[in-house]
Image (cartoon, grey):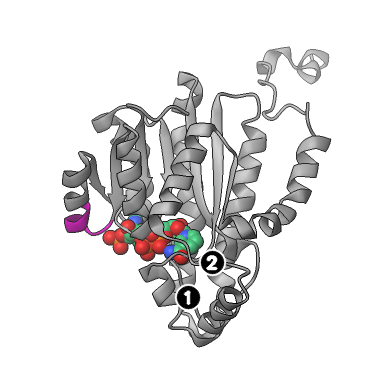
């Protein structure tokens, strides 16, 4: 996907990875619509990148309804959707509230799929587009305290794979980015739950994972978009493990190739056989 002059809708734009992504996308010539809740950092980022601030709470169904239409009315068709906003709710399940569950699933899973649903008709009719879902290696391996967060990320990875199968043969591409721990506020927050912190300490000490820098993650994601790669797994040393979990999805893709991905258009009621025989 060519990013020069492409219109990118980036959610979670003011976070650690979002900010690095906004800067890298701008360097590559993209025009940005930047989405997060808090308006002040969003406007500051818009000023520094030449993007447009679009404050919205993705957990609010009223804000989510028709969101892509409102963005496109102001800024024109979205060429690339980057679903990056997420909540990192860590803790033992019974220590979390029902509201924690609802908001985490809404933000990490419902909102990205809903935004894909909203943006797709325009992309398909224009004959180009790219859907980017920022997932996590927490959706590959389970860590204590990350049942909810990891569950939503596993769901997002799997749903994006399904979307890719549905979009086979269309000009709309997908990218699933499965990212390991990044030096970030999110990791600091997750580290406040002792068992999660101890788990990350162990895998980092064992060199199964390494702590990523946000700029390197942004460079990797943007390169994967430009190269049209369906998967990005970082750090590279963990990529084979993540790829193994993708094998059943890859096998299904091969076994089911050639199956139409969308139902054939319905014939008008009057032409259906049962209607004819009833005459
Ligand atoms: N950090 C890591 O170690 C790591 C590792 C693997 C994967 N990831 C993934 O990378 C992505 C970005 O992570 P990050 O560390 O950059 O996160 P972050 O620093 O916590 O930033 C989260 C962003 O989402 C926005 N946001 C939060 N709630 C929102 C809501 N209800 N509606 C709209 N926007 C909302 C925040 O701004 P407001 O609060 O102003 O809304 C902020 O811009 C996430 O998908 C995360 O799962 C991160």
Query: Is residue 133 visible to the viewer in this orientation of the structure?
Result: yes
Horizontal and vertical percent for residue 249?
74, 47
Horizontal and vertical percent for residue 203?
60, 75
Horizontal and vertical percent for residue 141?
65, 67
Q: Residue at x 43, y 46 (%)?
A: 219
Q: On the rendered image, what quadrant is the C terminus found in?
A: top right
Q: Residue at x 18, y 46 (%)?
A: 48
Query: Is residue 84 visible to the viewer in this orientation of the structure?
Result: no
Residue 84 falls inside the magenta stretch: no
Task: Please identify, in this view, whether the residue under mark 1 or under mark 2 is nearer the observer.
Answer: 2
Residue under circle 1?
98
The residues colored magenta run 37-42
Report whether 109 appears left or right of 277.
Answer: left
- Cα gap from disc 1 to disc 2, whole angstroms: 33 Å
Above or below residue 91? Residue 241 is above
Report whether 255 appears left or right of 142.
Answer: right
Secondary structure found at label 2: loop
Depth check: 5 or 43 in front? 5
Question: Mark 2 or mark 1, which is nearer the start of the sequence?
Answer: 1
Quarter of the image where one finds residue 263: top right
Above or below residue 194? Residue 45 is above
Horizontal and vertical percent for residue 26?
30, 38
Magenta span dominant secondary structure: helix
Above or below residue 226? Residue 158 is below
Q: Residue at x 32, y 26 (%)?
A: 5
Q: Which image quarter has ligand 1? A: bottom left
- Badge 1 density bin: few <14, some 14–19, many ≥20, Cα 10 Å: few
Residue under circle 2?
210
Q: Residue at x 35, y 34 (%)?
A: 28
């Amino acid at each position: 996907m060519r990013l020069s002059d492409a219109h990118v809708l980036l959610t979670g734009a003011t976070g650690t990875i979002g900010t690095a992504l906004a800067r890298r996308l701008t360097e590559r010539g993209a025009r940005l619509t930047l989405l997060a809740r808090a308006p002040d950092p969003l406007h500051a980022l818009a000023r520094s990148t030449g993007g447009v601030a679009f404050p919205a709470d993705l957990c609010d169904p009223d804000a989510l309804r028709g969101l892509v239409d409102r963005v496109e009315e102001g800024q024109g068709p979205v060429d690339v959707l980057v679903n990056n906003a997420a909540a990192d709710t860590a803790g033992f399940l019974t220590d979390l509230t029902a509201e924690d569950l609802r908001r985490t699933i809404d933000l990490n899973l419902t909102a990205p799929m809903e935004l894909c649903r909203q943006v797709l008709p325009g992309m398909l009719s224009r004959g180009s587009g790219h859907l980017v879902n920022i997932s996590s290696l927490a959706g590959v391996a389970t860590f204590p305290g990350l049942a909810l967060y990891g569950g939503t990320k596993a769901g997002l990875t799997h749903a994006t794979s399904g979307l890719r199968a549905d979009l086979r043969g269309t000009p709309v591409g997908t990218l699933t980015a499965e990212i390991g721990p990044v030096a970030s506020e999110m990791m600091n927050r997750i580290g406040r739950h002792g068992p999660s912190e101890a788990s990350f300490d162990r895998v980092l000490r064992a060199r199964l994972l390494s702590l990523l820098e946000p700029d390197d993650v942004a460079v990797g994601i943007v390169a994967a978009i430009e190269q049209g790669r369906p998967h990005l797994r970082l750090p590279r040393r963990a990529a084979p493990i993540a790829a193994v979990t993708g094998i059943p999805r890859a096998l299904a893709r091969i076994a089911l190739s050639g199956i139409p991905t969308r139902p054939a258009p319905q014939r008008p009621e009057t032409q259906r056989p049962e209607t004819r025989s009833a005459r």
